[in-house]
Image (cartoon, rainbow, N blue to C red):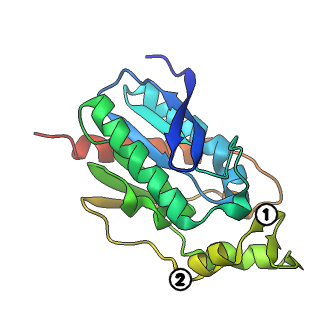
């Protein structure tokens, strides 16, 4: 099985956004919801290695740039949690239709604040975090300019901040599993610079593959 990535675009309600796919021809797909803000940068390499590991097991994956993130042309300061939730609902439904069956939803960190918006067969979470937990370290580097809040270098609207303050992982519409794998030493998102942990990738991949197979129709 190939583990090469393919890029493409999807149409969100706010505009055109990019996505990354591994093994799109597979009937079994995992829909990844990435962490937010700086945590996305710190876990991006781990996520891509995880997607490659799934492809080696015959499992495809779909990783969308949500509006205002990644290669998006929209300003993050104009984006709210509702925009992300709409994009997740629309793209997970599209992926379900394309694959002929709902994908398995895999959320990392803050992604678990949005995964209940997805159309899925099952849900898997790694280190789910409440909104306040995500905001806390960002506020240590806070700089206020007019009405815009700049947290850890990210321009986030007051409305988005208020939404995150109240956000916590929600009940989902199907079976849910939380992976308990841990890094050796500090968690990847708490380190001074982005890095990788091969043992962690192996543990995450093994846990997710086992979960997906356990949820397969019998």
The reply to whether the C-beta atoms of the residues labelled 2 and 1 are less than 8 Å apart is: no
Give the residue displayed 37% in from the left and 63% down from the top.
Answer: 116
* Residue 179 visible in the displayed image: no
Nearer-the-camera pick, 142 or 192: 142
Q: Where is residue 108 in the image (x, y as percent from the top left)?
A: 52, 56
Within the image, what quadrant is residue 115 found in?
bottom left
The picture places residue 171, in percent across and down from the top left corner, at: 32, 71
Q: Residue 189 carries which label?
A: none
Tell me, yes or no, if residue 86 can be seen here: yes
Q: Determine whether the residue tagged by mark 2 lies in a helix, strand or loop.
A: helix
Q: Does 105 sit left or right of 67 as displayed?
A: left
Give the residue pinned by disc 1.
Answer: 154
Q: Which residue is drawn at the image coordinates 70% and 40% (left, top)?
A: 71
Q: Which residue is drawn at 55% across and 62% down?
A: 109
Residue in the image at 55% along x and 66% along y: 81
Disc 2 marks which residue? 166
Reading the chain from its start, which is encountered first: label 2 or label 1?
Answer: 1
Callout 1 crowding tier (Cα within 10 Å): few <14, some 14–19, many ≥20: some
41 sits left or right of 88 in the view: right
Q: How many labels does the image show?
A: 2
């Amino acid at each position: 099985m190939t583990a090469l990535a393919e890029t493409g675009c999807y149409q969100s309600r706010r505009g055109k956004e990019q996505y990354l796919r591994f093994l799109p021809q597979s009937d079994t797909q995992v829909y990844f919801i990435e962490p937010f803000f700086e945590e996305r940068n710190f876990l991006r390499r781990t996520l891509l290695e995880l997607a490659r590991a799934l492809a080696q097991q015959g499992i495809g994956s779909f990783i969308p740039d949500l509006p205002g993130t990644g290669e998006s042309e929209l300003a993050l300061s104009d984006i709210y949690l509702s925009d992300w939730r709409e994009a997740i609902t629309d793209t997970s439904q599209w992926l379900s239709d394309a694959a002929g069956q709902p994908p398995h939803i895999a959320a990392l960190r803050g992604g678990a604040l949005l995964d209940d918006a997805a159309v899925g067969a099952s849900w898997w979470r790694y280190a789910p975090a409440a909104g306040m937990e995500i905001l806390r370290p960002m506020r240590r580097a806070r700089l206020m300019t007019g009405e815009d809040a700049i947290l850890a270098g990210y321009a986030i609207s007051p409305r988005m901040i208020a939404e995150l303050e109240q956000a916590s992982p929600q009940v989902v519409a199907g079976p849910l599993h939380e992976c308990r794998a841990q890094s050796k030493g500090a968690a990847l998102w708490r380190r001074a610079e982005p890095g990788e942990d091969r043992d962690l990738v192996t543990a995450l991949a093994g846990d997710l593959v086992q979960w997906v197979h356990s949820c397969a129709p019998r």
